[in-house]
Image: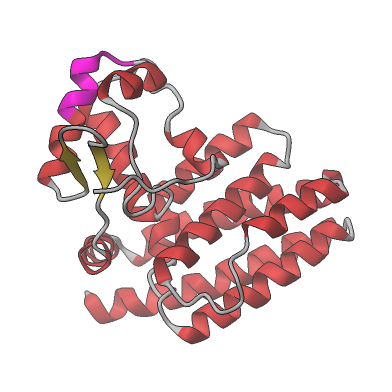
Amino acid sequence: MAAVRRRSTRARTAVFAPIGELGRAVRVEQRLAQAIRSGILEDGERLPSESELASMLGVATVTAREALVSLRAQGLVTTTRGRGGGSFVTRPVGATDDVLERRVAAMTRVDIADHGIHYATVLSGCAELAAERANVEEVEDLRAILPPDDTDDAATWRHVDTELNLAVAALSHSAHLARDVMRLEMEFGGLLRLGFGHADQQAALRDHHAALLAAIASHDGNEARRVVRARVRRLLGELAELHARIR
């Protein structure tokens, strides 16, 4: 399988940040699996080698190897040998959506509401801070994340939306907030993006991105916060409807 070249992103940087004291294979596996399912790591993307992964995450090489074995068993990673080989992300969209839907079904309405409150509060706070602090160049960096107008691929929209949220979080200039957003995206963001394959969802997402960037560019923190909260509220409503159908 040919390696897919990807630009370095804030999301990927956070994925490969050191695990710390919880350096067990299951923790490495969970972080990478969540990153794959949330769209942060893209289909066909080449992962670091076992030794590189261990160094980046601050774990033993055997720990990284065990995590990759588990990911291969789940069908999330494929490893090829020889020149040009390595471990590559394999993200079958249908299967991934099934996994996410099972997670939704296992949650209660209270769980969804509680996660939604946390998600909306943290993301809207980051958007407000970004509006207060972003300069012209940083706003243009945000615009560069957005896909072409004719993009209709669900995986691309999921990746772009996640990356934009993490980029906005970085503009808050708070490492704690940025790490919190990264965790929320991997744990909950993918559930909110289950409907991104539909044209009406993508149209709404384009409008949301345009409104958010306009608020940040004009340094309107109140509007940036309002835009994010309104969008999360709408996605939570759609997730609640999905939850009711599949329970």
Left-right relation of 185 to 67 = right
Which residue is pictured at 18% across the width and 25% down the height?
Answer: 65
* Figure check: 70 above or below 158: above
Q: Nearer the viewer, residue 128 or 208?
A: 208
Expressed as whole percent of the image width and height from the top left, the position of residue 154 reads 41, 71
Q: Which residues are magenta?
A: 59-66
Left or right: residue 73 compared with residue 133: left
Q: Quadrant of residue 101?
A: bottom left
- Name above or below for residue 54 compared with residue 4: above
Task: Please tell me which residue lies in front, 58 or 220.
Answer: 58
Residue at image location 28% in from the left, 61% down from the top:
100
Q: Main secondary structure of the magenta part?
A: helix
Question: In which quadrant of the rendered view does residue 174 lie?
Answer: top right
**Magenta stretch containing residue 64, yes or no?**
yes
**Residue 61 visible at all:** yes
Q: Position of residue 247 (x, y in %)?
A: 22, 74
Q: Residue at x 53, y 78 (%)?
A: 202
Instruction: Give above or below for 127 relative to 71.
Output: below
**Is residue 223 shown to the viewer in this render?**
no
